[in-house]
């Protein structure tokens, strides 16, 4: 474990809020192209949205995390607008992140839905206010707080890029490839010493529960949060890391016991780190010797002055787009495929339906990429960096590869830098150059050219250096 970093910012205020966003039975589920069902039957565990409000001086900030696979730009915009309107917190100071669970409701492939469109539409329309309500509650409950941070490791994740016997790069579990097992934990305490909130940062695709299950689940982040809350107290927020190339060591299963076990393992590891922290950071000072069977040193513990710096900067990156085919041809082929899927469904030919549905899903994201980006050289891509004392939270849209996070961490001026994707809207893998050379699903699915990863690293470090300029000059 790396040395801990601890602040006791007297000027820092914090509060949390939470709302249940579990979908009703029958709401469409759509995290897998291979699934044979369209509607989810029930929730194995509640899906939640949890918010953390922070204030330092006159500035207020929000971190909001939801058990969801993600949302397109339109729905993200509606959610962020509603949070801003209800809370009064400036949109530029709001981070909205998703856990990326693949066993939640279908909030991102609505065009694929043939049964239950009314239910997913109703669910989506209810979310902006439900999500904003958690943020509002967090703002209302702000009180003086102290912050501590440290890092460790957890080993529930693996590299998910494997090579098949035929030489094709596919999604699986590679036990031999290196993987980023870094686990970050931030703990916020009230001034009476009780825990107000814990932030758990970890990178791993929530794909433990696969296409076989029709139960809604938060996947492993849900039980991980619950474990931290049981051990430490307060609310726990799960911040998904740079998980574009990382998945669970056991996944793609219909057995809900598996995601619960992995989540508990992660939660226990995070709770252990959280319990070791002392947000009232103190220096040990020798005062005297107590004679006893052995002479025993006596100490006083002097608190350190606070570092209550709390700032956030946003930047729109110009990410390069690779050459994409025109959407007309893809749309025509996709329409034919969807008709074939329905025919197979009506005929009860599940094997053909599964094969055709997988092709339709792949063609669907190709069409979406073409619709959004064909003919463009670059696209604007959102990134935020938040500074909390000597800690940095870097977040961006899409699914960055873990090597991007590692490169940012290694060169960051922050003592701890936690890099996340799945934030403030938009889908798209951000593979590194090595992956572009190897090929595979993430490279085929991404709209971005190979140099996008280098741009993300460079821009993130520029913002970090600007935010931490004051610290570097001391």
Image: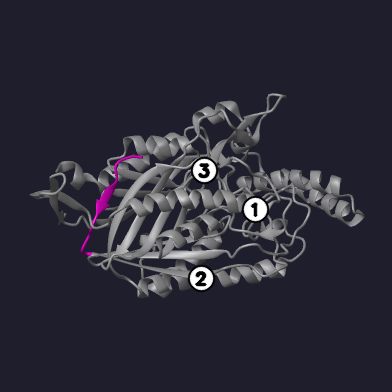
Dot label at residue 19: 2
Number of the front mark, 2 or 1: 1
Residue 422 image point, x, y percent: 50, 51
Q: Earlier in the sequence, mark 2 or mark 1?
A: 2
Q: Are the residues tagged 2 and 1 within 8 Å (C-beta)?
A: no
**SS under mark 2:** strand
Q: Are the residues tagged 1 and 3 within 8 Å (C-beta)?
A: no
In the figure, is residue 291 to the left or right of 356?
Answer: left
Q: Is residue 180 magenta?
A: no
| Cα separation between marks 2 and 1 | 25 Å
Residue visible at 50% across and 38% down in the picture = 401
From the image, tell me which residue sits under label 1: 257
| Cα separation between marks 2 and 3 | 25 Å
**SS under mark 1:** helix
- Count neighbours of disc 2 (C-alpha within 10 A) and say few if under 14, some if 14 to 19, many if 20 or more: some
User: For the magenta stretch, what is the residue range?
Assistant: 1-11
Q: Nearer the viewer, residue 461 or 391?
A: 391
Q: Is residue 119 above or below residue 303?
A: below
Furthest toward the right, the residue is: 347
The prevailing secondary structure element of the residues shown in magenta is loop
From the image, tell me which residue sits under label 3: 243
Residue 394 image point, x, y percent: 38, 48
Q: Nearer the viewer, residue 71 or 268?
A: 268
């Amino acid at each position: 474990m790396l040395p801990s970093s601890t602040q006791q910012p007297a000027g820092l205020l914090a509060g949390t809020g939470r709302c249940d966003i579990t979908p009703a039975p029958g709401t469409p589920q759509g995290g897998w192209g291979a699934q044979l069902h369209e509607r989810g039957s029930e929730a194995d565990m509640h899906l939640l949205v949890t918010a953390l409000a922070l204030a330092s001086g006159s500035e207020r900030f929000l971190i909001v995390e939801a058990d969801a696979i993600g949302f397109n730009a339109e729905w993200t915009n509606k959610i962020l607008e509603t949070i801003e309107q209800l809370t009064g917190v400036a949109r530029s100071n709001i981070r909205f992140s998703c856990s990326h669970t693949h066993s939640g409701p279908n909030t991102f492939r609505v065009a694929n839905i043939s049964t239950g469109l009314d239910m997913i539409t109703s669910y989506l329309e209810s979310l902006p206010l439900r999500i904003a309500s958690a943020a509002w509650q967090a703002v209302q409950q702000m009180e003086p707080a102290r912050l501590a941070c440290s890092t460790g490791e957890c080993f529930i994740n693996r590299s998910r890029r494997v090579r098949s016997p035929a030489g094709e790069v596919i999604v699986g579990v590679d036990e031999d490839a290196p993987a980023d097992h870094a686990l970050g934990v931030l703990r916020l305490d009230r001034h009476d010493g009780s825990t107000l909130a814990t932030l758990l940062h970890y990178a791993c695709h929530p794909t433990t529960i696969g296409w076989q299950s029709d139960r809604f689940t938060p996947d492993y982040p849900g039980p991980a949060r619950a474990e931290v809350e049981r051990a430490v107290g307060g609310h726990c927020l799960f911040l998904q890391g740079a998980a574009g190339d990382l998945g669970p060591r056991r996944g793609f299963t219909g057995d809900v016991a598996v995601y619960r076990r992995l989540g508990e393992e992660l939660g226990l590891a995070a709770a252990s780190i959280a319990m070791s922290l002392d947000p009232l950071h103190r220096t040990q000072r020798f005062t005297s010797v107590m004679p006893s069977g052995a002479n025993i040193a006596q100490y006083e513990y002097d608190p350190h002055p606070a570092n209550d710096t709390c700032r956030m900067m946003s930047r729109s990156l110009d990410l390069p787009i690779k050459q994409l085919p025109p959407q007309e041809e893809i749309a025509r082929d996709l329409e034919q495929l969807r008709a074939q899927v329905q025919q197979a469904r009506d005929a009860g030919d599940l094997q053909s339906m599964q094969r055709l549905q997988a092709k339709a899903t792949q063609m669907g994201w190709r069409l979406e990429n073409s619709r959004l980006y064909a003919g463009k050289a670059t696209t604007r891509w959102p990134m935020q960096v938040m500074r909390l004392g000597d800690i940095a939270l870097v977040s961006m849209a899409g699914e960055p590869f873990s090597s991007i996070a590692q490169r940012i961490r290694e060169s960051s001026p922050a003592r701890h830098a936690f890099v996340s994707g799945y934030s403030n809207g938009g889908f798209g893998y951000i593979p590194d150059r090595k992956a572009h050379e190897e090929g595979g699903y993430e490279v085929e699915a991404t709209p971005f050219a190979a140099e996008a990863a280098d741009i993300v690293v460079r821009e993130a470090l520029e913002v970090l250096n600007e935010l931490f300029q004051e610290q570097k000059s001391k």
